[in-house]
Amino acid sequence: MPDTLFISDLHLAPERPRIVEQFFRFVSSAARGADALYVLGDLFEYWVGDDDLDDPLNDSVAQGFAELAANGTAVFFMHGNRDLLVGAEFAARSRGRLLDDPALIDLYGKPTLLMHGDTLCTDDLEYQKFRAYAHNPQNQARFLALPIAARHAELSALRQKSESAKQDKTAEIMDVNIAAVEQALRSAGYPRLIHGHTHRPGRHVHRVDGRECERWVLGDWYDNGSYLRCSAGGFTSMEL
């Protein structure tokens, strides 16, 4: 039976070689033969721009996706908060396609809304303020004009600041806001929803305006990787 796979929040980085190895095993085995693979953000721990594509890790990841696509699996990418600057060059080298966030697709006859998930975390006001800054085209242009080494240093400092800030936030603040979830479902016509970002994998059912909507949350790859497998027969959460 044909199937479609979903992953997010891999946070690939040279200092996490075990997860990098797991990624390559995944694209060469579990993902091989799938109709499509959707990466819903934060594939990388951070991304300084497509002009860093010749970095050994970045190039090898792109080639891994390209080999998967060459074997017949369509590959799709959505930006996360960590890899917002992934662009057309990376997608082309990966033989994949960039998606808008949100993106509404037909998944085996069922309308399905795909999101990274960070826009649903509206209670985290500090993060939403930073997100607006990071999505500003002028701020992106300023950052991309810096030398690659300076961009690496700036994003490394931001990562440390972000991890420190999380220590002072409650788990509830960093999770989705239910009203935001319901509004996203309402605006898209009450579809199924799949997203990442919160690192809280699971299945949820929301009743929105009298309609039942299913929400699947993807897991992160910090400890052990996982993916969501979908077919006409249903969904299965798979551990690697």
Image (cartoon, rainbow, N blue to C red):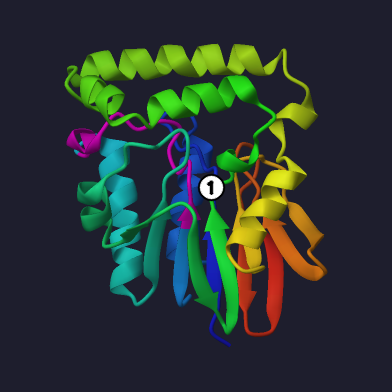
Residue 13 position in % (x across, y down): 43, 32
Towards the viewer: 206 or 84: 206
Label 1 Cα crowd, 10 Å radius (few <14 / some 14-19 / many 20+): many
**Highlighted range, magenta:** 39-53
* Residue type at tag 1: His
Q: Residue at x 33, y 13 (%)?
A: 153
Q: Identify the image quadrant of residue 191.
A: bottom right
Residue 221 position in % (x across, y down): 59, 43
Q: Is residue 48 magenta?
A: yes
Q: Identify the image quadrant of residue 163.
A: top right
Image quarter where the N terminus lies is bottom right
Question: Relative to residue 116, is residue 59 drawn left or right?
Answer: left
Residue 82 position in % (x across, y down): 45, 33
Q: Residue at x 34, y 33 (%)?
A: 47
Secondary structure under badge 1? loop
Please identify the residue farthest to the bottom as the structure is shown. Answer: 1
